[in-house]
Image (cartoon, rainbow, N blue to C red):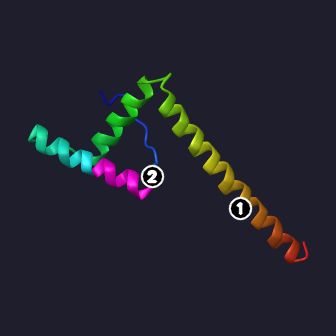
Amino acid sequence: MFEGRARVLLILPQDVLDRARVFAGEATTKLKRPVSLQIVLRALLDEGLKRTGDRPVMANVERQVQAVRTIRQRAGRAVRRRRKGSGG
């Protein structure tokens, strides 16, 4: 199961992380075995990626792409303003 592993830094909104923790707690109770947040996130990614044509998944991806684009645009504008203000 763990052949070809890779390390990934994943930055998540706090509410998503909280929901994953709740899921881990529920799974721990149901399975009567400890279930870590890492196990839950790995399972959610694996199952989510199997749903290639799923509209809600694609809509979520689109929202995230737009959010990243907006953040980068704002950051770029701020850098340009600083450069103009410093005489450069």
Estimate the spatial distance between the alpha carbons at disc 2 and disc 1, rounded to whole Å.
20 Å
Q: Amino acid at mark 2?
A: Leu
**Image height of 76 relative to 83, above or below:** above
Q: Residue furthest left?
A: 32
Q: Which mark is residue 75?
A: 1
Residue at image position (45%, 44%) is: 8
- x and y, in percent, of residue 52 in the image: 49, 23
Q: Residue furthest right?
A: 87
Q: Amino acid at mark 1?
A: Ala
Residue at image position (36%, 53%) is: 17
Assign a secondary structure to mark 2.
loop
Residues shaded magenta:
12-21
Residue 36 seen: no
Residue at image position (38%, 30%) is: 46
Of helix, strand and loop, which mostly describes the magenta segment? Answer: helix
Q: Nearer the viewer, residue 3 or 46?
A: 46
Assign a secondary structure to mark 1.
helix
Q: Nearer the viewer, residue 8 or 17?
A: 17
Q: Nearer the viewer, residue 52 or 10?
A: 52
Q: Answer with the quarter of the image where residue 14 lies.
A: bottom left
Please state if 85 lies on the left or on the right of 34 as rendered.
Answer: right
Please state if 74 lies on the left or on the right of 17 as rendered.
Answer: right
**Image height of 68 relative to 31, above or below:** below
- Tag 2 residue: 12
Q: Answer with the quarter of the image where residue 28 lies.
A: top left
Q: Quadrant of the N terminus?
A: top left
- x and y, in percent, of residue 10 in the image: 46, 48
Q: Quadrant of the C terminus?
A: bottom right
Q: Is residue 54 magenta?
A: no
- x and y, in percent, of residue 47 in the image: 36, 29
Q: Residue furthest bottom?
A: 86
Circle 2: is it few (<14), some (14-19), or many (20+) Cα within 10 Å?
few
